[in-house]
Amino acid sequence: MQKRLIVNHQLLDIMVMRLCHQLVENHSDFSDSVILGLQPRGKFVAQRIQSTLAAILGRQVPTGFLDTTFHRDDFRRRETPLTANATKVDFLIEGKKVILVDDVLYTGRSVRAALDAMIAYGRPASVELLVLIDRLYTRHLPIEATYVGRQVNSLQSQRVLVEWKGQQATEDNIWLITKTED
């Protein structure tokens, strides 16, 4: 296995700050906007975005976490059953501008499942997508992110790993991992 660092902790901090300023530019005081992190890994990005926005705005932006397990189109096609994550959405999204947040945009299937899952909480006025990494040329569905930290050219055989400090990592980093044949 070969690991190549594509975003170090300093650049990741800059990316998150830039994404937050883009959000403030488009959502102003967030009075009609909410953030939904896609479980499991989008939760950590959403928490980082929320804390950075709180520092910029001086107030908390409503943030929730959405599990899409049972809305996935491959749910019944796996040999081992998927384990659901906790959904925590303490607010209605009816008429709100929703910002879906995930770490990596790959095929677009998770985002499609999130669109289905969030309807249980109301009909949003609009939906935008924020991702740290957009893996180009891998989409199975016509889904694009509104806010992108970095676009990465990658092969199907590669994967992107986002590590957060305090969660089995010493620093925040993003890696491109390639399986090598032995």
Image: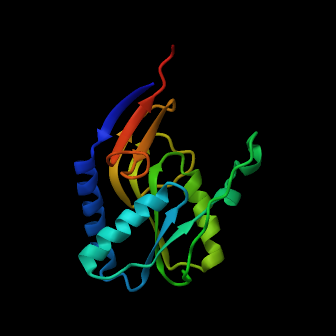
The answer to whether 144 is drawn above or below residue 57 in the figure is above
Q: How many marks?
A: 0
Instruction: Say which residue appears at 41% left-offset and 56% top-offset.
Output: 131
Residue 49 percent coordinates (x, y): 36, 66
The answer to whether 72 is drawn above or below residue 107 in the figure is below
Q: Is residue 23 visible?
A: no
Give the colour scheme of this rendering.
Answer: rainbow
Residue 138 percent coordinates (x, y): 49, 40
From the viewer's perspective, is 17 left or right of 140? left
Instruction: Say which residue appears at 42% left-offset and 84% top-offset.
Output: 32
From the viewer's perspective, is 57 left or right of 61? left
Q: Quadrant of the N terminus?
A: top left
The answer to whether 36 is drawn above or below residue 6 in the figure is below
Instruction: Say which residue appears at 24% left-offset and 75% top-offset.
Output: 56
- 32 and 174: which is toward the camera: 174
Instruction: Say which residue appears at 36% left-offset and 81% top-offset.
Output: 30
User: Quarter of the image holding residue 34?
Assistant: bottom left
From the viewer's perspective, is 176 left or right of 70? left
- 108 and 12: which is toward the camera: 12
Residue 84 percent coordinates (x, y): 67, 58
Residue 69 percent coordinates (x, y): 66, 57
From the viewer's perspective, is 1 left or right of 20? right
Q: Is residue 163 visible?
A: yes
> Residue most toward the top?
182
